[in-house]
Image (cartoon, grey):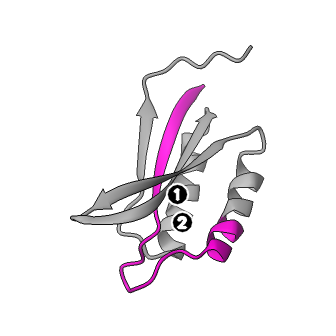
Amino acid sequence: MKTYQCFLGTNKPTAGVVTTYEWSQFLKQIDATFTEGYTVQKAIGRWHGVNENTFLLTVITNELKTLESLCQTYKDLFNQESVLIQELPTNPIFI
């Protein structure tokens, strides 16, 4: 299993931001996809010189394609230019 982080910005290029309601609806998709668990943190990111509130999704999984599909859905839903997925150089141990 590998650890991945996804950076999900909330500024919409066409104006506005991802609302609390919109995020809660998308969170249901994360719940349905990664039933074993995940972590979401609030962060402040910067994209093209503009600060934005960001959700940092961390998932430990063997299903990179599934994660990529979920991030593509976020990108499409909220008109994002991109979503960053990074693989962390970790070896997770569950005790």
Residue 19 x, y percent position in the rendering: 58, 76
- Under mark 2, the amino acid is Tyr
Q: Callout 1, which amino acid?
A: Cys
From the top left corner, tell me how far across and down residue 67 is, in percent. 57, 48
Q: In this view, does 76 lie to the left or right of 20?
A: left
In the image, which residues are magenta? 1-26
Q: Quadrant of residue 32?
A: bottom right
Res. 52 mark: none
Determine the residue located farthest toward the left in the rendered image: 49
- What residue does disc 1 label? 71
Q: Position of residue 25 (x, y in %)?
A: 70, 70
20 to the left or right of 74: right
User: Callout 1: few (<14), some (14-19), or many (20+) C-alpha neighbours within 10 Å?
Assistant: many
Under circle 1, the secondary element is: helix
Drawn side of residue 95 relative to residue 74, left or right: right
Q: Does the magenta stretch include residue 66?
A: no
Residue 28 drawn at (x, y percent): 74, 62
| Residue occupying the point 29% across, 62% down | 47
Q: Is mark 2 on a helix, strand or loop?
A: helix
Q: Quick check: 77 left or right of 11?
A: right
Q: Reply yes or no: does residue 17 show up in magenta.
A: yes
Task: State whether residue 18 is above or below residue 47.
Answer: below
Q: Mark 2 points at which residue?
A: 74
Quadrant position of residue 81: bottom left
